[in-house]
Every structure is written in C-alpha cells, then in structure tokens.
Image (cartoon, helix red, strand yellow):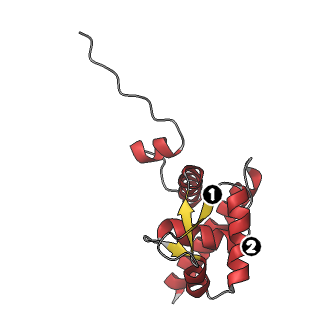
Amino acid sequence: MAQTSTTSDQLINTLRDTVVSMVRRDGPDLSARQLGVFLTCYLHEGAHTVRGLASTLNVSKPAITRALDRLGELDLARRKVDPMDRRSVLVQRTLKGAAYLRELRSIMNEAAGVPATGRATKAARGEERAPRRAAG
C-alpha cells in the first residue's frame, strides 16, 4: 500500500511541477477542461465531434463548445462542419497544437526527472540540427 501512495505522490508532484512550468512560461494558459479537451483530441486517434467529446468527457455540449472556442482562439484546434453530416462539427488538430503537445511532453518529462536526451526530445525543444552533408 505504501508503494501506491508513493507513486501517487510522485504523480501529483509531477502534475504540480508541470502546471507551474506551464503557468510561468510565455504561452497560453488552459483551464483543466480546455486541457482535457485538447489532450483527448490529440491523444485519441480518429475523428472527434463536439457530441463525442461531450460524451467521452461526460460534460455538456456547451461546455465543450466553450473549451473549443478558447482552443480555436489559440489555434490549438479548429472546428469544421462534417462534409458527410452537415449537422455534425469535426474538431481538427493544428500544427500549433501539435507543437504545444510536444512542449507539454517535454515539460512533463523534465518535471518527472526524465533525462532530456535523444532526437525526439531535442526536436520537441526545437534544438535538432539539420544533418551535415559529407564533404565531397
């Protein structure tokens, strides 16, 4: 039982450190609901609709709409009418949203004490260099 408590404490501290880092940095602050919508759209494959997100997150459609309004203002997600069913609205990912997710992963890894090594981490921080050409 002590192991579970220690793991929970580590997770809570990682969450706290991540949130503090996100608040301190120069960038958008997302509410818990906005972050939940954002992460659901980016981490769960497939098409997302307002109706589906409301069901998945067990919140009202107007709450999802308000969260998507904010995500849209920040260009982290956008809405588009479903061409197959004009009554339905699809939620699309954006390049800025993908970059935000990479940054969030990097901050979480740092908060969790995961070493920042490897190409993926460097690319997420924008530090990856173009490959050198062989002298010829």
Q: Residue at x 62, y 73 (%)?
A: 36
x and y, in percent, of residue 76 in the image: 63, 57
Which residue position is annotated with label 1? 76
Within 10 Å of disc 2 (Cα), the crowding (few <14, some 14-19, many 20+) is few
Q: Secondary structure at mark 1?
A: loop
Residue furthest left in the image: 136
x and y, in percent, of residue 3 in the image: 50, 82
Which of 39/90 is in front? Answer: 90
Which of 91/89 is in front? Answer: 89
x and y, in percent, of residue 64 in the image: 68, 77
> Alpha carbon of mark 1 to alpha carbon of mark 2: how far?
14 Å
Residue furthest top in the image: 136
Residue type for callout 1: Leu
Q: Secondary structure at mark 2?
A: helix
Which residue position is annotated with label 2? 66
- Can the viewer see residue 30 in this picture? no
Q: Residue at x 44, y 30 (%)?
A: 129
Q: Is 24 displayed left or right of 120 in the figure?
A: right
Specify the quadrant of the image occupied by residue 92. Answer: bottom right
Which of 106/117 is in front? Answer: 106
Q: Is 27 displayed left or right of 7 in the figure?
A: right
Specify the quadrant of the image occupied by residue 60. Answer: bottom right
